[in-house]
């Protein structure tokens, strides 16, 4: 991701990973905020589709293609 920062959304994804790693690190080290960590893990499930969309954009897949549109709808 760091090598493709010129693509739209790459910087946000890198920032997202930094924040998530720091939040989970606090949860593990302090043994607090387990409820917040559980919600964050649920949110992380949608990131699978966001990352896949980013890979599709990097590989120059058309936004009108079936696989791109299916991924967008699945993310909703």
Image: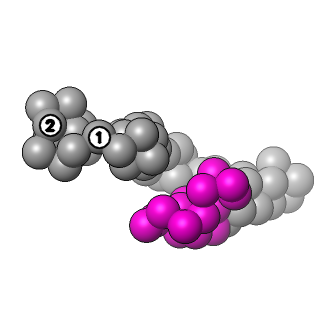
Q: Is residue 19 above or below residue 75?
A: below
**Main secondary structure along the magenta-highlighted residues:** helix
Front-most of residues 51 and 60: 60
The residue located at (60%, 56%) in the rendering is 4
Q: Is residue 30 left or right of residue 14?
A: right
Q: How many marks?
A: 2
Query: Does 56 sit left or right of 3 as displayed?
Result: left
Q: Which residue is mark 1?
A: 61
Could one spot residue 44 in this view of the protein?
Answer: yes
Task: Give the SS element for disc 1.
Answer: loop
The image shows residue 70 at horizontal and vertical percentages of: 16, 34
Taking 51 as reference, is 2 left or right?
right
Q: Residue at x 42, y 40 (%)?
A: 59
- In reply to whether residue 21 is colored magenta, the answer given is no
Find out whether the residues at labels 1 and 2 contact each other: C-beta distance under 8 Å: yes
Judge whether residue 5 is colored magenta.
Answer: yes
At which x and y percent is residue 74?
20, 37
Q: Is residue 40 left or right of residue 75?
A: right
The Cα–Cα distance between marks 1 and 2, rounded to whole angstroms, is 7 Å
Which residue reaches farthest right?
29
Q: Which mark is residue 52?
A: none
Q: Which residues are magenta?
A: 1-15
- Residue linked to disc 2: 65
Depth check, front residue: 3 or 51 = 3
The x, y position of residue 20, in whole percent, is 65, 57
Residue, x 20% and y 30% (percent of image)?
Answer: 67
What is the secondary structure assignment of the residue under circle 2? Answer: loop
């Amino acid at each position: 991701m760091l090598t493709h920062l010129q693509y739209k959304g790459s910087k946000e994804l890198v920032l997202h990973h930094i924040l998530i790693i720091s939040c989970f690190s606090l949860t593990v080290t302090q043994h607090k905020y387990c409820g917040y960590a559980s919600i964050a893990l649920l949110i992380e499930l949608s990131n699978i589709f966001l990352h896949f969309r980013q890979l599709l954009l990097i590989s120059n897949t058309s936004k009108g293609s079936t696989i791109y549109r299916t991924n967008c709808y699945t993310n909703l």
